[in-house]
Image: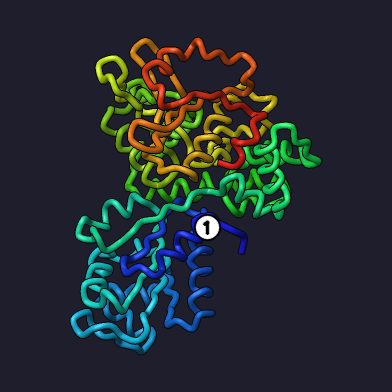
Amino acid sequence: MQYRTLYSKLEKHLQHKTYTILTGARQVGKTSLLKKLYYKLKDESEIVHFINLESKEILKLLDERPDNVFNLINIIPKKRLEGKTDKRIYFLIDEIQYLKDPTNFLKYLYDEYEYNVKIIATGSSAFYIDNKFSDSLAGRKRIFQLYPLSFNEFLEFKNHQEINEEIGNIVSEPNYHSQYGLNINKLFNEYLVFGGYPEIVLEKDFEEKKWLLNELKNSYLRKDITDAGIEKEHKFMMMVKIYASQIGNIVNKNEIANTIGLDNKTVEKYSHVLEKSFHIDLLKPYYRNVRKELTKMPKLFFNDVGLRNAILNKFEFPFYRDDKGALLENFIYNQLRHKHDPYSIKYWRTTEQNEVDFVIEESFEQGYALEVKWKCENFSNKKYKKFENAYPNFPLSCLDSTNKEILIY
């Protein structure tokens, strides 16, 4: 299996008693990671069992009573009050949201068999997690989110490990001349068009990539709509298309409500579903002076640029596109998200419309800021003096499509 950066964190968390919950969009690779953990534990001669809850028989069994899970392995561990068993039992559960009450299932097993049972589970949608995983699991679980492939992972999946190494050389040595320059640009353009869903990255034919992305849009996005109980699917898809055309922009939900003929509350609900199904992220503003800087409106990005392009049916290569600057900004956000806690990534804007694309707070009131341009040749720091004077601990720089450091965030 190809390398995913999240795997090492999941592997490390196996030793902890808190349960491991892996979330992310459909088709992003959660089951593959779960199976990789399964084979690792099996190779280490641990007691481990893989459970797929798409099996109706198993689902019925576990819905009846949580400790029916031990019927699957014919082993009953000691309860927490009886002490630790010699060997822990690992249950790897795919699609745990299919249970009628996943919160009760996990809470019961944790409270009864705290030391002796470890559960690693996947869930396709945070929409389910929010509604079915109540606060009673506080302190009993840790949630990990799996994103579409970063550009580094994209190169690994395409067996271009040597290019990953080369990019590091280019960034660390300003005068370094790479033999892979043209190939890097070609792969970068491919990523900007088709994104980072694993199946699509592995497909070599561009027409087939388009078909797969459209299938993702037509099947899995609509499944999220159905599961969320959305009744006006046509209106929802209209809003999705508007959002796709506004990446990198401030979202004015009042304006969108008027455009598609919905009330503000419904637009808010639709946005919530898109967020909790891992299709979009809404960035909050960074501010110190609330009166002058605070705007409640978030800034919008898609979690995968390929899906976003499919929604708009725009598959031209970036150089020929009028939205290439916004596409690059979305890409950089997706890269930053792999490096930083998403909650630490914000944008800055004043009531006078002065704006900085990204403000990343690495520690209290310290970090760095980024302005994104397709070409930085016309970038002038004078335009950003207000930000630089207000936030000297956030040095500002410009990134464009020629900066190879954007490829290794």
Question: What residue sits 36% from the left and 18% below the top?
Answer: 390
Horizontal arrangement in the rendering, residue 151 relative to residue 50 (left or right): right
Q: Identify the amino acid type marked 1.
A: Gly
Question: What residue sits 36% from the left and 45% below the top?
Answer: 276
Q: Quadrant of the C terminus?
A: top right
Question: Residue 203 appears at what percent x and percent y?
Answer: 68, 52
> Is residue 235 at least partly visible in the picture?
no
Question: Residue 104 appears at what percent x and percent y?
Answer: 23, 67
In the depicted view, which residue is nearer to us: 19 or 212? Answer: 19
Question: Residue 86 appears at what percent x and percent y?
Answer: 35, 86
Question: What residue sits 28% from the left and 64% below the top?
Answer: 102
> Is residue 325 at least partly visible in the picture?
yes
Question: Residue 363 appears at what percent x and percent y?
Answer: 37, 38
Q: Residue furthest bottom?
A: 74
> Height in image: 118 above or below 146?
below
> Height in image: 232 above or below 208?
above
> Height in image: 359 above or below 231?
above
Give the class, few, some or many, for how many residues have Cα within 10 Å of label 1's Cα (few <14, many ≥20): some
In the depicted view, which residue is nearer to us: 23 or 124? Answer: 23
Q: Would you name the residue on which mark 1 appears?
A: 29
Q: How many marks?
A: 1
Colour mapping used in the image: rainbow
